[in-house]
Amino acid sequence: MTRARIVGTGMGVPDRVLTNLDLEKIVDTSDEWITTRTGIRERRVAAPHESLSDFAVPAARRALEMAGVKGHEVDLVICATVCPDMPFPATATMIQDRIGADSAAAFDISAACTGFLYALGIARQFIESGAAKTALVIGGEVLSKYLDWNDRSTCVLFGDGAGAVVLQGTEEEDRGLLDVALHSDGSLGELIFRPGGGSLHPPSKEMYESNLPFIKMRGHETFKIAVRSLAEVSNETLRRAGVAHDEVAWFIPHQANRRIIDAVGQRLDIPEDRIYVNIDRFGNTSAASIPICLDELNRAGKIHEGDLVLCSAFGAGLTWGACLVRW
Ligand code: ACO
């Protein structure tokens, strides 16, 4: 059986660093509150002229370079994002053009913080069915552009950036993407949403003068659901793959809140030294969170051949999911 295997990883983030001390000058908050309640110390924020493709294209190029794959060899480009360069065309087509993937299919998908795992699940089907030989999957966001910088309950949480992976088929048994589990519950959509700019609240002077274009989140209610869903979906993939918790070499949870990560780690009984955390440096980068973690770990040489890597994410929709990879 052909399985999809990750053969390259990459990331791209803005140069500009916004620290908690910088935020103290913008809203009524403190470094102490942000650090203790979220684990975030700083995040990367795009400059006014920068957009998603400015981070997604370098992330894609780095992943291709690691994989030793040329742009024209890519036959599928999927970009998971809720911050595309434009409502259309898809940012994936801009990436396709800039990397020279001249015969690739390209499209965006929207599943917020779970977007990368949704895109990975789709790409896996293309590879396993033989519909694509080489797939490029990008998760990227520029959520700083959609934050209400007067709302301290959201503006301190998010950061910008992109991560990418290249997938190819392998016939090796028990290697590559062993499982992907994806879920949703639209009845809880109003826990995290950005209502303005779509066909329900289309662009108008009134819309832009309201707060509809900005992210709204009921964080406290989201917190408990996030912990429960992340633990459940992680267990689901482990159970389906017949893998025990102590066989997991790395657990990469979505980086939304350090307290969520710790609570999920405890529920899964995975020790702290096997849970990857970079929320202190990047904040919540939504769809970029997991591929950025993967690239950091991979480039640091901390993932070894044969290691089991478990990733799980949770976000607006609500959506949640997990994947299990044998490296
Ligand atoms: N600085 C100082 N005080 C603050 C700040 C801030 N930045 N933000 C909120 N507060 C205050 C509140 O006003 C409140 O004050 P009050 O008690 O006087 O009313 C108090 O802190 C506690 O507020 P809570 O919202 O209850 O704080 P909580 O401990 O729940 O932390 C947080 C908030 C960080 C948002 C947390 O609930 C969380 O991480 N939730 C989950 C987020 C998540 O997982 N989102 C999914 C992905 S996002 C996506 O898909 C785009």
Image (cartoon, rainbow, N blue to C red):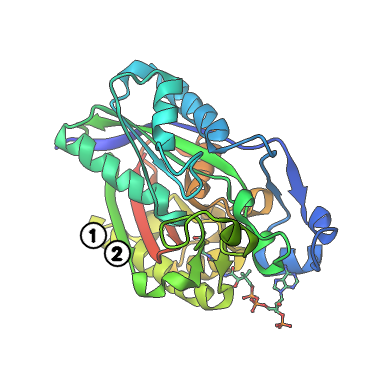
Q: Quadrant of residue 69?
A: top left
| Picture residue at 57% right of the left edge, 77% below the top | 220
Q: Amino acid at mark 1?
A: Arg
Vertical comparison of 73 with 119: above or below: above
Q: Badge 1 local density, few (<14 within 10 Å), some, or many (20+)?
A: few
Q: Which quadrant of the frame does ligand 1 lie within?
A: bottom right
Secondary structure at badge 2 equals: helix
Q: Which residue is nearer to you in this view: 169 or 266?
A: 169
Mark sitting on residue 240: 1
Q: Quadrant of residue 161?
A: top right
Q: CA distance from mark 1 to mark 2?
A: 6 Å
Vertical comparison of 120 with 111: above or below: above
Query: x, y percentage for residue 312?
Result: 42, 57
Q: Is residue 302 visible?
A: no
Q: Quadrant of residue 299?
A: top right
51 to the left or right of 96: right
For the residues labelled 1 and 2, say whether their Cβ atoms are less than 8 Å apart. yes
| Picture residue at 66% right of the left edge, 34% below the top | 49
